[in-house]
Amino acid sequence: MTPRCAVLDIGAGTGIWSIAAAKLGAARVVAVDMDELLVGVIRLLADEHGVGDRVEAICASSFDLQLGREFDVVISETIGYLGYDERIVEVMADARNRFLSEGGHIIPETVSLHAAAGKLKVRTESLPVGVDLDFDALARLNRNSPRVLKRSRDVTLQTRATRLISTDLRRAKQTPSLRELTATWDLGELQPGEFPDCVIVWAESRLAPGVKLSTRRKTTSWLPTVYRIAPPSRRFNKLDFSLSLTPESNYWTATFTDGNDRESQGYSPEAAATEMIAAARGAVFTHAHGHVLLANDRQAPSVIELRDVTSDDEKFLCELYHTTRSDEVAAFGWSKAEQDSFLTMQFTMQQQAYRMQYPDAKHSVILFDGEPAGRVIVDRSAHAVSLTDIAVLPKFRGRGIASRIISRLQDEVDAIALSVDRANASARRLYEKHGFTITGESEFNFEMRWKGNRNEHL
């Protein structure tokens, strides 16, 4: 710090960096935080350290500040557990453009996310009184919830660290896409009992050349995030990990591979929440005599069945198709009659296309307690069974019907292929929850595939 240096500290917290800058000789320091109480703490500590005359504390968002390009150094500690979750990229881009003087420096210079697969040492599945309890259901739910790693000794890393994504804060203008961050690890000679049961993700940041901050190490502000997975029951030689971070949630998949054999798992907090809500409402999912039974709120169990499509179903299927695209077509600004005419024409073309492309496919109506609720098309003529189409009427959605149909199909076959519209994020999440992974893509669709682990592997 030079005697004439000006420093801007964004997201200053208790103002430690601001006070340190002033004590190192900065002539002017502006500490900015959105918490009014913390701003008071900054002023108090600055006075206690004898630098209150050079540290100005402001309660505001940095995006609302009206300051000139007068700062030689801009500091921001707006790094979350997952690096990008406090908008560090946008904060620094705005600061570069409006506050940083020519030739000035920003701290930190980069932010990145890293991952490694490991095995947790902490277990809570036993009771000291020796009661025999089955924790499988609880473990399955828990695996869908990310956790923080409070003590580094609680996990043994079994793979090298892999960088998932990195951003140069000196140049970047906006947060990059955090969807489908991937890593691949060779599992070497690990045996089934030694396989990873989690992936640890942490943030790293270069503060200045030769000075690096890693949240994997013990810090007072950050902790690594733990994404748990179910280790496979047999040996595989490779683990593929995919993580999608959205403003709403985290989604991750773990795929163990050995040559052409794959065992894939998908996780998200929404999957656990759906199962917990269903359980709270008295839902019980079973596969009995080819049916999926849903026991709900003390009522008689609801039965989901499949029956062949007949010519009498044409009107129902057309109405079902309308519901899948009505919102999209309504945005065209057409009249109701024009929308209906267009959707009916599109339905007819879709039916013709299915018959040409999948002449041997089985078309079924999904019945919910005997009432038509949707339709499913399955083509078993290919090497991998194709889930050509599945749709459910709006009033039956949210009851796990499509999920149960997919699960039942997975119980029957070794592999399933499908194509999903790129814009249909909810459908894609459903398939990922059931272990489907993306194998290809086109302008409009993602190609997805699920590979089971059936008797031929035993």
Image (cartoon, helix red, strand yellow):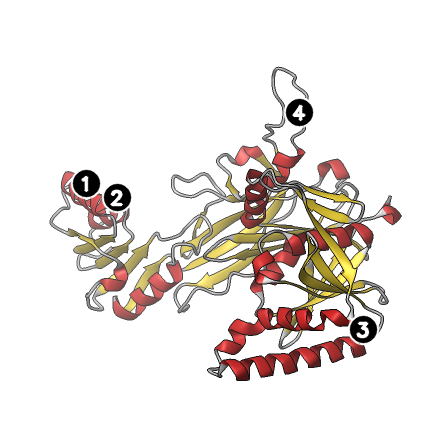
* Measured Cα–Cα span from mark 1 to mark 3: 73 Å
Residue of label 3:
358
Give the alpha-carbon distance from disc 2 to disc 1, as whole Å.
8 Å
- 45 sits to left or right of 430: left
Q: Which mark is drawn over residue 45?
A: 1
Indicate which label's residue lies in the foreground, 1 or 4.
4
Q: Which residue is mark 2?
A: 14
Q: Residue at x 65, y 83 (%)?
A: 345
In depth, the one of 323 and 175 nearer the eye is 323
Compare marks 1 and 3 and give the one earlier in the sequence: 1
Residue contact between numbered discs 2 and 1, judged by CB atoms under 8 Å: yes
Where does label 4 land, which residue? 133
In terms of depth relative to the viewer, which is nearer, 346 or 232? Answer: 346
Q: Is residue 233 left or right of residue 91?
A: right
Quadrant of the snapshot with the N terminus: bottom left
Amino acid carrying mark 4 in the image: Leu
Q: Secondary structure at mark 1?
A: helix
The quadrant in which the C terminus is found is top right
Residue positioned 36% across, 53% down in the render: 78
Mark 1: which amino acid? Leu
Residue at position x 81%, y 45% in the image: 289
**Type of amino acid under label 3:** Tyr
Closer to the camera: disc 1 or disc 3?
3
Q: Is residue 142 above or below residue 179?
A: above
Specify the quadrant of the image occupied by residue 427.
Answer: bottom right
x then y, percent, for residue 73? 28, 60
